Amino acid sequence: MEYKPREIEKKWKKYWEDNEVYKVSNNSDRPKYYVLDMFPYPSGSGLHVGHPLGYIASDIFSRYKRLKGFNVLHPMGYDAFGLPAEQYAVQIGVHPAESTRKNINRYRQQLDNIGLSFDWSREVQTCDPKYYKWTQWIFIQLFQHYYCNDADKARPITELVEAFSKEGNARINASTDFEGSFSADDWNNMSAKEQDDVLSHYRLAYRQVQYVNWCEALGTILANDEIKDGVSERGGHPVERKPMVQWSLRTTAYAQRLLDGLERVDWSEALKTEQRNWIGRSEGAKAFFKLKGHDEQIEIFTTRPDTIFGATFMVLAPEHDWVDMITTPEQRAKIDTYLDYVGSRSELQRMSEVKKITGEFTGAYAINPLTGKEIPIWVAEYVLKDYGTGAIMAVPSDDERDNNFANHFGLEIIPVVDKSDYPDADMKDKVGKMINSGFVTGMDVKDAIDAVIQKLEEDGIGAKQINYKLRDANFSRQRYWGEPFPIIFDDEDVPHPVGVSELPVELPALDNFKPTSEGKAPLGRLEDWMNSEQGRREIDTMPGFAGSSWYFLRYMDADNDDEFISQEAVNYWQDVDLYVGGKEHAVGHLLYSRTWHKFFYDLGLVPTDEPFKKLINQGMIGGRSNFVYRANEKFAEHYLEEQLKSVSHTFEKNKIIGEGENAFEVDFACETHKVAIELKALHRLERYDDKHHEQFEKLDYTFVPIATEEIFSHYHDFSPIAEKIKKATDKGKAEPNVNTKDTALFVSQDMIEDRSMVTKLHVDVNIVHHDFLDTDAFEKSRTDFRRAVYVLNEEGKYKCSHAIEKMSKSKFNVVNPDDMVDQYGADCFRMYEMFLGPIEQGKPWNTEGINGVQSFLKKFYALFYDENGWRVVDEKPTAEELKVVHACIKNVNRDIERFAFNTCVSEFMKCTNELRRLKSYKKSLLQDLVVLLAPFAPHLCEELWHELGHEGTVNLATYPTHNEDYLKESAITYPISINGKKRATYDFPIDASKEDIEKEALALDIIQKWTEGKTIRKVIVVPKRMVNIVVG
RNA sequence: GCCGAUGUGGCGGAACUGGUAGACGCGCUGGAUUCAAAAUCCAGUUCUCGCAAGAGAGUGGGGGUUCGAUUCCCCCCGUCGGUACCA
């Protein structure tokens, strides 16, 4: 009987759905296991074969774990708010809610098609009010907490308020950017507005004026991880720095814990390093520099306090608050010019011109606290407002940028570190002996760092400090399609959270998604909504990462309307055991989720402080693009030139005819016969009218217009064109043949003589087989290819070239999983995706290979059925059969555990081939194999499981375990090497002694031949492994 | 520049703890079946030389450790990804 995947798969998909086979309970005696796929954003283009790689892997693992006796949570949902839907709405006019719904339906269809074992009853969509009610609730929690450094966790803001009212802020050790101090009296005398301003410097969700990445084209600000190479990641639009009042999350409070947590998770080292770099911890010191003629001091951060004696100038970021204050009247104009220049520079310019040295002197001086010397204060772009304090002490002797700057502007350089003992060290290496450095002169750099910090602390002008590159996350978007903030401002602009009972604050209906005329967010168009009874609503919305930072928790208890998740649910499921997804979320999503999770942990809402125990990044699947080569005008010209030679006329190329003012150049002309040929694309020749003919007539020439299309059309037989020229010579007139419109000539890749005569074009990979073009399909694919003419190779085929590129529509290399499932079945598609290679590696997709997996499935099926029907027999298996099957069980088990799904597929193939060879169709063996294969090919195995006489789903069968006894060999084939080079193999009994093996090996004829006349220096026998004979 | 991956036949890839390099599959070659094709089945397929037996080379390149290295160490090169005035 024939294997018919389409029938089988349809049948069992329905069975699974009808019987709610994948529904998971929160109450189970089984141990829990949580397998999660990264939240997909349902884009309009649907899934291509690269997307399901991770889903299939996680599905196999989920099914495997289920068979191993775990209660497995394997949910799916959608990150449904976001920019693309809104962009689409602005461009096409479809409401984001509608396009999102449509895209989600398509995704669901595609996912279902693959036979994934999701518990869809737990589906979440971030744009669903039932879901974002809790996103808003979480935001309120963030708003109502601050980070206490003493407790090293988030604490309620009410505690802080109480402390302020009792003793001011003197003893508060919190994560804050608040400067200055106040007493209890000060606090109690503040107005509500003033108190709120202070508190906003402590809240974990707060508002402040920030320099943000403003993207004019998208009409919104972007987070750092939404920008690539200075332009927006989506759309590639320019981004500029702009000050705006924004909601922010104080993620920096968690920097150290985010770093520490990485030690406890099972992620790839590469990914952890990427996060570490993003967090960017650096140890150093802060120090205060007095200003000449001012009372204030400027705070700087340095990782090299040891070099302070070499600090010969100071540099402030252009945006530094004090630039204006310290600039002297004489320098005012120059500074203003410089600031204008900086403001005019886009992010892209700033990034691409890093090497450009710019800056300006403020006229002010600071006092180096250890040398007492006055040092000039400069403003320069290379100092960033957001890092450290936005001010540096510049040490041109030991910092490359400071050095370049000093050289450029002629500033003083004092060497302070003698590195002569470290010839390989460069400037930034912290090694050497201090020179010219007061009390630290002679010390090692490392000691000097400590000594200087100690001195700064003693003098009360500095302290040890740790700095992070990580910045507080921007949480406002000037967009419509996102979660509204549950915030209302009172008359004094003090924000108040909406009462929990009033959640969710639903996103109101809107049909115009452009910013308002004042450049405010789209919700600002809804005056009624914005100006509520309680006050003015926040009209910005939350960013994409709001909803996606906690979705994995919601799956545990997706329908709960009373809590964001119940304690029972979260205490049962705990955290994600296996998280599978793309590497693009390395610093964005994964960092935000971890931060939120730690916050929940602080509040006692979740039992773990890291959400994702093990993480696997699936590699990108590249598209295999195919190319055809279309002959261009140069090709036609060359061809015509060659052909004209064979015609009797004596044509000259690029010939000038006529004289003086009337002279002009034609492509080909024959003086004897007075024929002039113009070779042009048809549409250009069609513009020629009678005037052209007349022009030639005046010179007594016959004008023959020939279209490149004509040339291509008659490529294989030039005679019609020769005829045409001849005729024109007689009759004095010729027209281009309009019937050749849309004729193009395509040259087989292996027939190309000159690359410049052809244009390389992407061709749809679905009409190319083994790199040979299906010319019929090709001609139907585009109207301008309908009259294609080919230069075929010797075998009469059109060969395409190929390349591996990113899969995208524009490259015609997109392969749709639906088509694969349609042609080969979901089981085959699943297994082929896995068979391609290691899950974490990038690899190219090549549909040609899939028939290997298809024929495996046919062969496997044929173990159960022959042409007469069911062939399985209930007989006792032989030792050999048992060995084959149990080796397979052992290896598949081992390989799944190490996420090597590709080799699992190989094992199945090997086993099936062996059983075929043995003509073994025995029930007990096949039954084990069916369960073993079920995670990979669930439809087929469900079918066979029932055919084997079982009730209920194969998903709940018991996973087979191998018996080591069956795998024992009686003899082992040893490789026998001479000097490490294999020369023979020989079977020795399993229990042969070292001595026997050595003796017998040396006695072998082949070995005798190799050792003849040589001294045997050593014989190495590794039992059960190999023999190596060293001769000399 | 810095950080991280990675490099094995024509192609995707395999090789568990240093022990028969190229499993499994694609493709290709030859054969069987067929009127023919598809499908299927059998055999072969790292490269070089050789009719063959066989010999030599071989896991990006160069060195090293070892009886033995795709695997461990050092240096270099290519490809891919991340990041970039981070004080």
Image: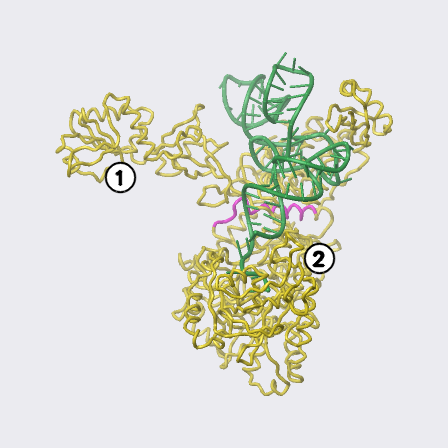
* Coordinates of residue A117 in the picture (x, y in percent): 63, 49
Secondary structure of the residue carrying numbered label 2? helix
Residue A603 sits in quarter: bottom right
Residue located beneath label 2 in the image: A264
| Mark 1 belongs to chain | A
Nearer to us in this view, A954 or A843? A843
Which mark is nearer the camera, 1 or 2?
2
* Coordinates of residue A340 in the picture (x, y in percent): 42, 68
Q: Amino acid at mark 1?
A: His
Left-right relation of A463 to A197 = right
State whether residue A501 appears in this view: no
Q: Amino acid at mark 2?
A: Arg
Q: Magenta includes A95?
A: no
Q: Residue at x 48, y 64 (%)?
A: A409
* Coordinates of residue A320 in the picture (x, y in percent): 51, 71
Q: Residue at x 28, y 37 (%)?
A: A681
Nearer to us in this view, A543 or A41? A543
**Height in image: A550 above or below A844?**
below
| Mark 2 belongs to chain | A
Overall secondary structure of the magenta stretch? Answer: helix
Give the chain letter for green. B
Q: Are marks 1 and 2 in contact (CB under 8 Å)?
A: no
Residue located beneath label 1 in the image: A683
Where's the N terminus of chain A, which quadrant? Answer: top right
| Extent of the magenta region | A45-64
**Height in image: A586 above or below A960?**
below
Give the chain letter for yellow. A
Q: Residue at x 64, y 83 (%)?
A: A168
